[in-house]
Image (cartoon, helix red, strand yellow):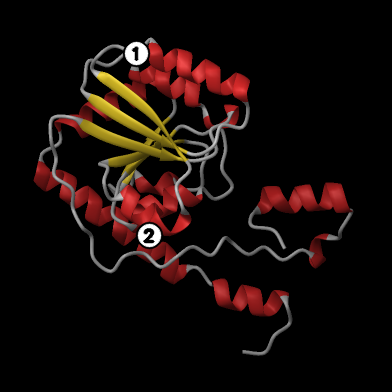
């Protein structure tokens, strides 16, 4: 079983399995919230990242980018650092940030409180170098929070649906932060609703059940 075409290639290479014996079934996420609970838009833009805190998640580049804005921003990082060396590099970057930007490593967050945690923020930001799904991205959309993501995720359509932003470089990211910071409450609420609608559409259009039944040869 693989979740996408890249995993299919990995399975073939590592296990030497024929393509017809590999079932592609996407990750099965939790059902999106029925109704969005909006958060008040204030002067400080509150961002969140829930992820493994590793090199491939571009944490250093994210902190660097935040250091170049004059906006009032708070970013909370949830997750475990994959190495002490990388952790110290990130902490050094955080210590050098200007007073208008606050970045806080928050440690691990339990899966059952991820939805309520995400709802405390204005947006999730993840400038990852690559995701085959991006669980926390979908979870943010599910609870009605727009996302700021790199082009290396499966969620590029969020931009077209006004459910989030896709950025390819530092300047684009800075522009999106400015746009989101200056956004009024009405427009922001619409982005939140669009995010939730986007997640609902994905969930209802994904054929998870037939895929698993076929994979394990189970009669419905």
Image location of residue 42, percent across then percent down: 13, 35
Relative placement, left or right, of 149 versus 174 is right
Q: Which of the pair 188/80 is nearer the observer? A: 80
Q: Which of the pair 3/63 is nearer the observer? A: 63
How crowded pointer 2 is (Cα within 10 Å; few <14, some 14-19, many 20+) is rated as many
Residue positioned 18% across, 30% down in the render? 44
Residue positioned 28% across, 54% down in the render? 144
Image location of residue 31, percent across then percent down: 40, 68
Mark 2 element type: helix
Distance of label 2 from label 1 (alpha carbons): 34 Å
Residue positioned 54% across, 37% down in the render? 80
Q: Which mark is residue 7?
A: none
- Image quadrant occupied by the C terminus: bottom right
Q: Which of the pair 81/138 is nearer the observer? A: 81
Q: Is residue 144 above or below residue 35?
A: above
Which image quarter: residue 3? bottom right
Q: Earlier in the sequence, mark 2 or mark 1?
A: 1
Q: Is residue 219 above or below residue 55?
A: below
Residues tagged 2 and 1 counted as in contact (Cβ below 8 A): no
**Residue furthest bottom as drawn:** 219
Say which of marks 2 and 1 sits in front. Answer: 1
**Residue where numbered disc 1 is placed:** 97
**Residue where numbered disc 2 is placed:** 199
Which image quarter: residue 98? top left
Q: Is residue 219 above or below residue 71?
A: below
Relative placement, left or right, of 30 versus 130 is left
Image location of residue 34, percent across then percent down: 28, 69
- Image quadrant occupied by the N terminus: bottom right
Mark 1 element type: loop
Relative placement, left or right, of 218 versus 189 is right
How crowded pointer 1 is (Cα within 10 Å; few <14, some 14-19, many 20+) is rated as some
């Amino acid at each position: 079983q693989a979740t996408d075409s890249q995993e299919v290639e990995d399975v073939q290479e590592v296990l030497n399995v024929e393509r017809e014996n590999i079932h592609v079934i996407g990750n099965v996420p939790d059902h999106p919230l029925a109704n969005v609970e909006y958060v008040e838009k204030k002067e400080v833009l509150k961002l969140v990242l829930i992820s493994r805190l590793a090199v491939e998640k571009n944490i250093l580049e994210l902190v660097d980018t935040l250091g170049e804005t004059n906006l009032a921003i708070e970013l909370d990082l949830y997750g475990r650092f994959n190495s002490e060396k990388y952790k110290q590099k990130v902490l050094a970057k955080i210590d050098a940030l200007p007073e208008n930007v606050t970045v806080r490593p928050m440690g691990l967050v339990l899966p059952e409180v991820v939805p309520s945690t995400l709802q405390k923020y204005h947006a999730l930001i993840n400038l990852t170098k690559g995701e085959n799904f991006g669980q926390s991205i979908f979870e943010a959309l599910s609870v009605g929070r727009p996302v700021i993501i790199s082009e290396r995720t499966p969620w590029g359509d969020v931009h077209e649906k006004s459910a989030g932003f896709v950025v390819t470089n530092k300047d684009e990211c800075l522009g999106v932060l400015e746009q989101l910071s200056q956004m009024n409450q009405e427009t922001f609420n619409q982005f939140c609703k669009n995010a939730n609608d986007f997640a609902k559409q994905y969930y209802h259009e994904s054929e998870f059940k037939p895929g698993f039944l076929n994979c394990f040869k189970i009669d419905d």
